[in-house]
Amino acid sequence: MKSNITITELLLSGFQLFQDEKEFKFSIDAILLAHFGEAKSNKNYLELGTGTGVIPHVLYHRGARHVVGVDCNSSVIELAQKSVIHNDIADAVSMVDLDYMTDAGKPYYGQFDGIYMNPPYFESNSGLISQEESIALALHEQQHSMKDRLLQAQRYLKFGGILWMIYTTPRLESLLSAIEQTQFRVKRMRFVHGNQDKVSKLVLLELKYGGKLGMMVEPPLYIYEVDGSYSDEVQAYYE
């Protein structure tokens, strides 16, 4: 095994994930998103930009049995598929080497009841951009705007399907503006805080393709207690 490949204990169903130290590794954002949406055994789910495949693994742990993860990074998809096989869930979870922003995804159009997406948070010209191309693509919008990504996500959904996503709160206004230019409507929103004394830096959203106006803002989600330990809700995500 290459020295830069590590194995991370996911603490769910005994799962282990293979990760490359040189690639973008999953963070708590993915865990929060995977627990925000549904995971039903009779529904088809897709994750756009799956990376390590952590979200499909969590969805399987929660009960989903038809999950596809796609990513345009061949090396991370190879590792994600290795994790799927290692954890013996290949009958329910598939990893596909695919740039979902291109027409290569046509065979999957209109096939899914729900989509999970953790898109790049930052504009292409903001902040420091990593010299590692895969990390830069994961964090910065580069050639595709948020509107572009939302319109493409629509193509993979059945009409009436749901998109769950997590985004940076400081850019929420621009996200809502992009949503207005699509057939999505926000149905649920939940702000995420480090703890009760911190402002929100992340926000979880549920969008319905072809949905009507009408949105529910849920109580805030606190990741940590003041003493630095996980909140009871977040701790339960790892059990």
Image: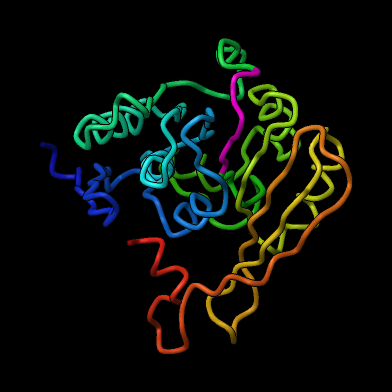
Give, as a single range, the part of the protein colored magenta: 110-117
Q: Is residue 116 found inside the magenta-colored segment of the image?
A: yes
Q: Nearer the viewer, residue 144 or 52?
A: 52
Q: Nearer the viewer, residue 75 or 13?
A: 13
Q: Is residue 19 left or right of residue 114?
A: left
Q: Is residue 130 left or right of residue 201?
A: left
* Residue at x 26%, y 44% (from the top left corner): 17
Q: Quadrant of the N terminus?
A: top left
Which residue appears farthest toward the front when viewing the image?
Answer: 42
Q: Position of residue 26 (x, y in %)?
A: 39, 51
Vertical side of 226 occupied by 117: above or below: above
Splitting the image into 4 quarters, where does residue 114 fall?
top right
Count of labels shown? 0
Q: Nearer the viewer, residue 94 or 178?
A: 94
Splitting the image into 4 quarters, where does residue 88 fall?
top left
Q: Is residue 239 found inside the magenta-colored segment of the image?
A: no
* Residue at x 53%, y 52% (from the top left corner): 33
Vertical side of 204 occupied by 70: above or below: above
Q: Is residue 3 left or right of residue 157?
A: left
For the stretch drawn in magenta, the main secondary structure is strand
Q: Position of residue 215 (x, y in %)?
A: 81, 55
Q: Position of residue 177 (x, y in %)?
A: 84, 47
Q: Position of residue 48 (x, y in %)?
A: 54, 33
Q: Is residue 210 left or right of residue 188?
A: right
